[in-house]
């Protein structure tokens, strides 16, 4: 973290160094020394020396002049900085630009092969540094230009790609780290095999593929609306292959760069907030990872599991596949036979497969394309090359389809070869499906009949119990209080081995939790409410009734209850992996949770909460959502538990006030802690805290940092503002392929913990945000920004403390 702050400082210093600017050219007898600079005629760019790192390495480079903070776009001597030495950039009479150190050694130089009568070096207003003849302004005659040697940034007007005549290949290379501009391991470059497409590599391994150009944009682009203030162009002919974008509105400051984690960012300077807005970052989600689903697999983030095989194919390693490891891909279910496999199935809205094994023709129609494919037995798919004009051109794939994903609403059509007649292997499958589904229907019908009859004669229900205790239930609708089995006390004591200590698995705010095994072998979790628990009969009823009515795969399932004398016992399904906090905040077990798993957990909690808030019949506010109330099942699926404090809302009610503030510090929003106001937005706040905890692997409560007094939320927000969001991420999960998904999650977390409840999104908006289909708003300052503002436990009237969480009941005086 320290590095980042010093880094920010450096950048600030850097923009102050500009002293005697004004000129934009040097000629042979002149040079740019330290403290001097060139400024482009429009004043947008500046060239000069800047310093990085604690050892004061000096570089010569070009930066945005009007922008504070991270603004360097090009570095000349990226690999050979000046250390303890002054530098001087000179133009020689042989038309070379050279950087020499104080003892005259050449640290960097251009290598134009021609020289001219009166050479000059000029910083153009596009940010391009060129060496040219003073009297010749034709770009084709430049002797040298920095746009031919990109670093990590592609500025507007800069061609990325190849010149087949001169052999120049212009591509982006990431910096090694924040303060080291030497080439890092990520590159983004055109691959000219088959139909050319840009690919992002880590060293030489593909990370992300942009897909072939479709006339509008690269096929893998998930941007719904291209930025209206830019023009995009892709050129591919005998002489050249490149992609370029131009600004329509020249007053905008924009850049496209490859960051140190291998994420390609499109950014635009926001003058009002004095910071960069990132409007596109690639890769965007897991499906963007190159070949995540292997050969003939299709990735779809909305599905579970994400990977599916193309029709006619089955997973090559079904066991791995079910575990979510799909890189082995799919194989044919029945051998391919060209005279049978002569039909096509259309996949819409997909990113076209890797075109390195493709053949193309720019003028063919779709019909010609199809026939061409049918003539070659190894042809497995076809598609239109260009979709701008109703579709033209032809792309054919041979022997393999790899890295296909669904892009909702913006993808293209892909036609994959399958057997056309019903007589092949598919026919057999269809028959089996027909037989299978009718059997299933019969089974379901019989179950329904049996269930209806069972309900009629089953009297042993909660309603009866509560009636006998004189309870009225939270909801007057008695019919809904049925269907919760009551277990005899002796069954429970036997199952938990007489509540033995060795069966104890946890301690919640209101009592102990034991693991038990019923006679039939079913594992259960038994929550025994302590006798002196503040959870009286009311809360008990509350919890039992709420949860009996709630059915969702992300809510823990109540199996039954048990009451005897003073004992109040709830019986849940058993969660072998304990609660999220135990796994997450434990150094040894947190390694079990890689990012995809954590992201699934975030999504699961969001789904559970959305159900509570909106989809269940009751509209429920949980009021005590926290990591220790999220349990994990065998597959690490999250389930929300502990409804002792939940409150049901009517449709018209939006906010309620309570005198008894109950909850857990660190997860309660300010308006609740201070004023006792709660609404669904209180749960959203708690959710946001959990998201940030999951990403950072640290607890919000008790978070401390040597450099500041911010809470985890404040810490995250400061880094977000500085554009260094990823610095807060748990190092064990940080991989470049996840970077944008992680970044997105942090932003969502920050949106959820905003000070003002109205600013926080609803859970349904959160779900949309998590799916990655929308642009995210910029969060404002979070509630409980500073750790010190948090009330201490000692303020509380009655405190029930458990092992490591503290649940507090504030008896406020109103
Ligand atoms: C200049 O660079 C040369 C070669 O890297 C090096 O040997 C020399 O020490 C440098 N001069 C200074 C003053 O650092
Ligand atoms: C360039 O300068 C060097 C020394 O500064 C001189 O020897 C040489 O003749 C010059 N070349 C031209 C082409 O002017
Ligand atoms: C100029 O230098 C670059 C590397 O900086 C190299 O790839 C290129 O081949 C050189 N060109 C000539 C003409 O020497
Ligand atoms: C260009 O961008 C600036 C800054 O965003 C904006 O104020 C201006 O209206 C834009 N001009 C046009 C013609 O779109
Ligand atoms: C392909 O299918 C045709 C028509 O059913 C059949 O005659 C032929 O033997 C098959 N070829 C192979 C290699 O299985
Ligand atoms: C592309 O297809 C058209 C129509 O079939 C044909 O006339 C043309 O020669 C083809 N071009 C190439 C490069 O194969």
Image: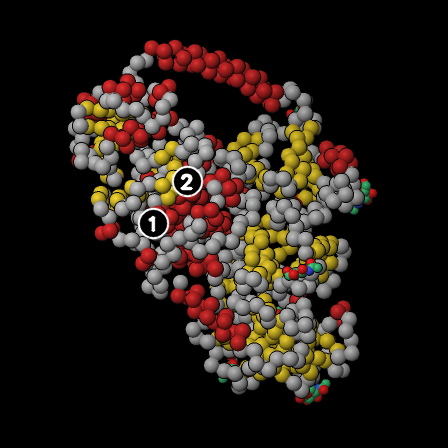
Judging from the image, what secondary structure is the residue with disc 1 in? helix
Q: In x, y percent, where is residue 152?
A: 57, 63
Q: Which mark is residue 133?
A: none
Q: Residue at x 67, y 49 (%)?
A: 217
Quarter of the picture containing the N terminus is bottom left
Above/below status of 275 relative to 296: below
Residue 448, position as x, y percentages in the image: 44, 14
For label 1, the residue is: 674
Where is residue 389? Give x, y as percent: 77, 43
Q: Residue at x 63, y 46 (%)?
A: 224
Would you place residue 542 above or below residue 491 in this image? below
Identify the residue under disc 2: 655
As drawn, 360 above or below 76: above
Residue 606 falls in image quadrant: top left
Q: Position of residue 25 (x, y in %)?
A: 68, 79
Is residue 787 in sight in this rendering? yes
């Amino acid at each position: 973290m320290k590095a980042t702050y010093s880094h920010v400082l450096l950048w600030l210093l850097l923009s102050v160094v500009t002293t005697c600017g004004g000129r934009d050219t040097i000629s042979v007898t002149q040079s740019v020394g330290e403290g001097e600079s060139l400024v482009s005629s429009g004043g947008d760019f500046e060239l000069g020396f800047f310093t990085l790192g604690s050892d004061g390495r000096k570089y010569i480079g070009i930066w945005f002049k009007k922008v504070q903070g991270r603004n360097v776009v090009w570095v000349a001597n990226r690999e050979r900085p000046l250390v303890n030495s002054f530098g001087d950039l000179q133009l020689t009479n042989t038309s070379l630009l050279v950087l020499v150190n104080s003892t005259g050694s050449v640290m960097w130089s251009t290598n134009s092969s021609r020289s001219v009568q009166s050479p000059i070096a000029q910083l153009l207003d596009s940010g391009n540094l060129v060496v040219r003849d003073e009297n010749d302004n034709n770009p084709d005659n430049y002797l040298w230009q920095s746009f031919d040697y990109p670093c990590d940034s592609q500025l507007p007007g800069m061609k990325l790609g190849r010149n087949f005549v001169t052999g120049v290949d212009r591509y982006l290379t990431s910096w090694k780290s924040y303060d080291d501009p030497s080439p890092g391991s990520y590159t983004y470059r055109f691959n000219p095999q088959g139909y050319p497409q840009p690919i992002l590599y880590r060293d030489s391994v593909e990370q992300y593929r942009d897909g072939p150009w479709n006339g509008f944009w690269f096929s893998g682009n998930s941007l719904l609306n291209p930025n209206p203030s830019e023009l995009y162009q892709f050129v591919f002919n005998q002489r050249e292959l490149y992609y370029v974008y131009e600004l329509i509105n020249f007053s905008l400051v924009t850049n496209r760069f490859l960051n140190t984690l291998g994420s390609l960012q499109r950014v635009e300077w926001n003058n009002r907030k004095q910071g960069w807005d990132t409007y596109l970052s690639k890769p965007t989600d897991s499906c963007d990872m190159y070949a995540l689903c292997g050969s003939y697999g299709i990735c779809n983030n909305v599905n579970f599991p994400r990977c599916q095989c193309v029709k006619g194919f089955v997973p090559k390693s079904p066991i791995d596949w079910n575990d979510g490891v799909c890189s082995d891909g799919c194989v044919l279910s029945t051998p391919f036979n060209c005279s049978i496999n002569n039909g096509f199935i259309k996949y819409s809205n997909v990113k076209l497969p890797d075109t390195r094994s493709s053949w193309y023709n720019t003028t063919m129609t779709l019909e010609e394309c199809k026939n061409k494919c049918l003539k070659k037995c190894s042809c497995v798919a076809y598609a239109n090359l260009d979709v701008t004009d109703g579709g033209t051109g032809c792309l054919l794939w041979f022997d393999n389809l790899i890295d296909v994903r669904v892009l909702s609403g913006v993808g293209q059509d892909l036609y994959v070869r399958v057997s056309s007649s019903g007589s092949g292997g598919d026919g057999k499958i269809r028959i089996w499906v027909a037989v299978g589904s009718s059997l299933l229907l019969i089974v379901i019908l019989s179950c329904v009949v049996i269930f209806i009859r069972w309900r009629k004669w089953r009297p042993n229900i909660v309603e009866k119990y509560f009636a006998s205790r004189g309870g009225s239930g939270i909801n007057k609708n008695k019919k809904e209080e049925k269907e919760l089995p009551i277990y005899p006390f002796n069954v429970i004591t036997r199952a938990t081995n007489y509540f033995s200590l060795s069966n104890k698995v946890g301690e919640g705010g209101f009592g102990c939790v034991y693991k038990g095994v019923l006679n039939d072998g079913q594992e259960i979790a038994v929550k025994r409410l302590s006798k002196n628990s503040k959870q009286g009969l009311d809360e008990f009823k509350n919890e039992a009734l709420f949860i009996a009515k709630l059915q969702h795969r992300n809510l823990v399932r109540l199996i039954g209850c048990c009451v005897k004398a003073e004992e109040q016992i709830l019986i849940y399904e058993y969660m072998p992996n304990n609660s999220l906090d135990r796994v997450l905040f434990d150094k040894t077990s947190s390694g079990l949770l890689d990012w995809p798993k954590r992201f699934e957990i975030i999504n699961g909690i969001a789904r559970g909460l959305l159900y509570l808030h909106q989809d269940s019949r009751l509209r429920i506010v949980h009021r005590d959502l926290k990591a220790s109330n999220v349990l994990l099942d065998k597959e690490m699926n999250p389930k929300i538990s502990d409804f002792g404090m939940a409150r049901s809302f009517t449709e018209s009610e939006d906010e309620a006030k309570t005198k008894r503030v109950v909850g857990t510090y660190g997860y309660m929003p300010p308006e609740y802690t201070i004023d006792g106001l709660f609404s669904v937005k209180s749960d959203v706040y708690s959710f946001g805290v959990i998201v940030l905890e999951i990403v950072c692997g640290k607890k919000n409560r008790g978070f401390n940092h040597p450099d500041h007094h911010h809470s985890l939320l404040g810490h995250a927000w400061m880094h977000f503002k500085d554009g260094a969001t990823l610095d807060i991420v748990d190092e064990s999960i940080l991989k470049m392929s996840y970077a944008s998904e992680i970044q997105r999650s942090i932003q969502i977390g920050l949106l959820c913990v905003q000070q003002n409840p109205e600013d926080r999104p609803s859970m349904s908006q959160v779900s949309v945000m998590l799916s990655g289909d929308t642009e995210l708003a910029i969060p404002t300052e979070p509630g409980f920004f500073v750790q010190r503002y948090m009330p201490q436990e000692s303020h509380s009237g009655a405190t029930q403390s458990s092992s490591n969480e503290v649940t507090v009941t504030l008896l406020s005086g109103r």
